[in-house]
Image (tube, grey):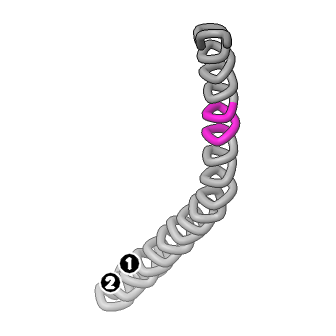
């Protein structure tokens, strides 16, 4: 409470504290967004790989069923 008799000094300190808090919040949000963006690419590749594998397996099952049901010559 060094500025209890100086309202201008108190306002200046309040503005300084508020700006530092806003800056820290912005830095935290930017860090979070960068982390999230870094996860999107590997997760996208993993999803594509999983879907590709699942479609390949489904195709093999379908071919097996179709081979059993096809008329023999």
Can you name the residue that lies furthest to the left here?
7
Query: Which residue is labeled 2 in the image?
Result: 11
**Magenta residues, start to end:** 50-56
When the figure is inspected, residue 64 is found, relative to residue 38, above or below; the finding is: above
Classify mark 2: helix, strand or loop: helix
Q: Is residue 46 left or right of residue 24?
A: right
Q: Quadrant of residue 68?
A: top right
Any magenta on residue 53? yes
Q: Nearer the viewer, residue 66 or 47?
A: 66
Q: Residues within 10 Å of mark 1 (few under 14, many from 20)?
A: few
Q: Residues within 10 Å of mark 2 (few under 14, many from 20)?
A: few
Q: Nearer the viewer, residue 47 or 27?
A: 47
What x and y, as percent, mark residue 70? 59, 13
Q: Which mark is residue 14?
A: 1
Question: Distance of mark 2 from mark 1, alpha carbons?
Answer: 5 Å
What x and y, as percent, mark residue 1? 46, 72
Q: Residue at the location (37% across, 82% down)?
A: 15
When the figure is inspected, residue 40 is found, relative to residue 57, above or below; the finding is: below
Classify mark 1: helix, strand or loop: helix
């Amino acid at each position: 409470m060094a500025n209890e008799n100086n309202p201008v000094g108190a306002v200046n300190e309040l503005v300084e504290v508020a700006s530092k808090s806003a800056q820290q919040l912005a830095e935290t949000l930017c860090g979070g967004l960068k982390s999230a963006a870094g996860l999107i690419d590997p997760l996208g590749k993993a999803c594509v790989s999983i879907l590709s594998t699942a479609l390949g397996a489904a195709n093999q099952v379908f071919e097996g069923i179709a081979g059993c049901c096809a008329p023999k010559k």
